[in-house]
């Protein structure tokens, strides 16, 4: 072809590939992710380069010092929780003790006693309880969200925060710059005018940080007066109340926390707030003496791409590997890493009853197809798979042997396990696990049971689609 423009574009494409491949190889990515990115860059130099620059580079490392400083500074100035910490071996069986040691190493938190934790499985009731707690706030409100929509629901809760700020309550609002990108000046200005401190988690203010689309705070946190906390899967917006006709009924799981575990959740917020703003939240008003309210043993675990270990990845792997009787997992996005896949199949092969409740529909169809590409090996090993059909499943829960459970923001995909900033609550004991198991059994009645014979009968085109998308699962 004699067209000089063609040759210029081609040569530039190859030069771009030669520049990006070494950059890719210098990153500490799993080999499968490296190969996936390399394939994309070579196959589509320009599109692949843009995608890699946006999603493939962990630019949050540029602010590693600030995040590390946040954890050290906040951690050193927090009130002592020794009185509420669980003594080694106290009230726990050997399996739970092993998981405690791991969680303590991963998160630098200890299980706390005398907590009251309420399981919330109806999004409308959940939002009602959050609004009720906000109305009762006396001195402080801290909120951190991945998605906050500027729709009817988001505006109503915003106006409630404005009302409390004008009444003298100190309100701090931290939102993710990508998940909540629709929050423009028109929505935020009334909050700022009322005295609410508003901050964006990521991306930051610099041009380079505004390319950090791949690193997100997926956390959902509300803390009222340092005494009541909420966390789980639900964001703020009309769709989370089932008001989006395309998504339909929204099935989510959230927790209401009371007791010393709230201070651990407050620490997560304080670290994120310091990271985003530089302000230290360490006073007694932020961390009041806990009120004894219940008998639940609980521990907050957080994770992010700056951690030495991928906390939720390690925790989920170990919990499944520790299982002796049964594992019940509900998640909205299921694209397992190879270690997680091995843990699930190995546990099933040694006789543990593994049951997965996954979403049968979703806002991102490619995620569903990527997850389904793993069904064959799971079903062959004896794992039970159910796809929720009543609406959109957005819960993120895991129970093991009916006496250990975790509820939080992390899905079972690469993004949640290795890229996002996530948070969850571990509950040690049968009460919470049994409530989650009851919810699981009820949800299964609204799901399709995927069996191996029926799954093998799917069309060739469907298999090709699933396995094609699977190639990119490490970078989804």
Image (spheres, rainbow, N blue to C red):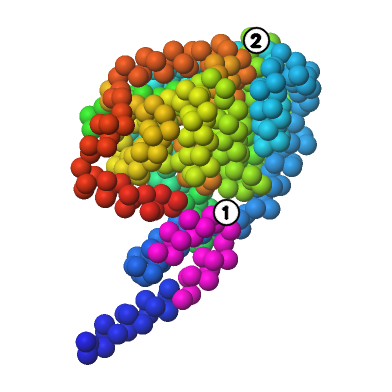
Closest to the camera, between mark 1 and mark 2, is 2
In this view, 416 is above or below 232: below
Task: Say which mark, if any, is on residue 295.
Answer: 2
Question: In the rendering, at what x and y percent does residue 251 appear?
Answer: 36, 23
Give 267 or 359, whichever is nearer the viewer. Answer: 359
What segment carries the magenta color? 18-39
Judge left or right: residue 336 versus residue 444.
right
In this view, 188 is above or below 226: below
- Helix, strand or loop: magenta stretch: helix
Q: Secondary structure at mark 2?
A: loop
How far apart are the alpha carbons under marks 1 and 2? 39 Å
Residue 38, located in which quarter of the rendered image? bottom left
Characterize the local packing of mark 1: few (<14), some (14-19) or many (20 or more) Cα atoms within 10 angstroms.
many
Q: Reply yes or no: does residue 152 show up in magenta.
A: no
Q: Secondary structure at mark 1?
A: helix
Residue behind mark 1: 60
Residue in the image at 51% along x and 12% along y: 434
Question: In the rendering, at what x and y percent does residue 187 appear?
Answer: 39, 39
């Amino acid at each position: 072809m004699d067209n000089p423009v063609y040759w210029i574009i081609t040569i530039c494409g190859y030069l771009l590939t030669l520049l990006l491949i070494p950059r890719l190889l210098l990153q500490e990515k799993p080999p499968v992710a490296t190969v996936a990115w390399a394939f994309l860059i070579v196959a589509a130099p320009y599109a692949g380069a843009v995608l890699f620059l946006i999603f493939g580079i962990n630019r949050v490392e540029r602010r590693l010092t600030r995040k590390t400083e946040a954890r050290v500074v906040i951690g050193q100035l927090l009130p002592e929780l020794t009185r509420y910490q669980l003594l080694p071996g106290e009230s726990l069986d050997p399996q739970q003790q092993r998981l405690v040691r791991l969680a303590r190493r991963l998160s630098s938190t200890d299980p706390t006693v005398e907590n009251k934790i309420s399981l919330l499985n109806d999004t409308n009731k959940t939002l009602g309880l959050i609004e009720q707690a906000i109305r009762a706030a006396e001195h402080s409100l801290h909120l951190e969200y991945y998605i906050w929509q500027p729709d009817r629901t988001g505006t109503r809760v915003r106006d409630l925060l404005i009302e409390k700020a004008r009444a003298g309550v100190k309100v701090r609002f931290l939102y993710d710059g990508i998940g909540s990108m629709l929050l423009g000046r028109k929505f935020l200005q009334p909050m700022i005018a009322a005295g609410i401190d508003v901050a964006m988690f990521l991306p930051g203010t610099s041009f380079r940080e505004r390319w950090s689309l791949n690193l997100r705070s997926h956390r959902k946190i509300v803390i009222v007066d340092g005494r009541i906390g909420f966390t789980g899967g639900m964001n703020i917006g009309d769709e989370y109340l089932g008001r989006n006709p395309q998504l339909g009924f929204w099935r989510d799981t959230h927790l209401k926390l009371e007791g010393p575990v709230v201070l651990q959740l407050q620490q997560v917020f304080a670290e994120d707030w310091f990271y985003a703003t530089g302000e230290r939240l360490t006073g007694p008003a932020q961390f009041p003496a806990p009120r004894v309210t219940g008998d639940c043993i609980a521990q907050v675990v957080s994770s992010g791409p700056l951690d030495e270990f991928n906390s939720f990845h390690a925790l989920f792997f170990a919990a499944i590997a520790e299982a002796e009787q049964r594992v019940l997992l509900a998640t909205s996005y299921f694209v397992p890493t190879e270690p997680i896949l091995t843990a699930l199949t190995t546990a099933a092969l040694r006789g543990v009853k593994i049951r997965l409740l996954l979403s049968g529909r979703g806002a991102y169809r490619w995620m569903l197809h990527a997850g389904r590409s793993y069904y064959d090996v799971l079903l062959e090993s004896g794992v039970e798979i159910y796809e929720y059909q009543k609406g959109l499943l957005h819960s993120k829960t895991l129970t093991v042997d009916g006496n250990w459970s975790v509820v939080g923001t992390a899905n079972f995909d690469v993004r949640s396990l290795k890229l996002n900033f996530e948070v969850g609550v571990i509950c040690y004991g049968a009460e919470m696990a049994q409530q989650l198991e009851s919810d699981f059994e009820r949800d299964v009645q609204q799901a399709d049971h995927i069996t191996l014979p029926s799954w093998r009968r799917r069309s060739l085109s469907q298999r090709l689609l699933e396995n094609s998308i699977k190639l990119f699962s490490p970078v989804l």
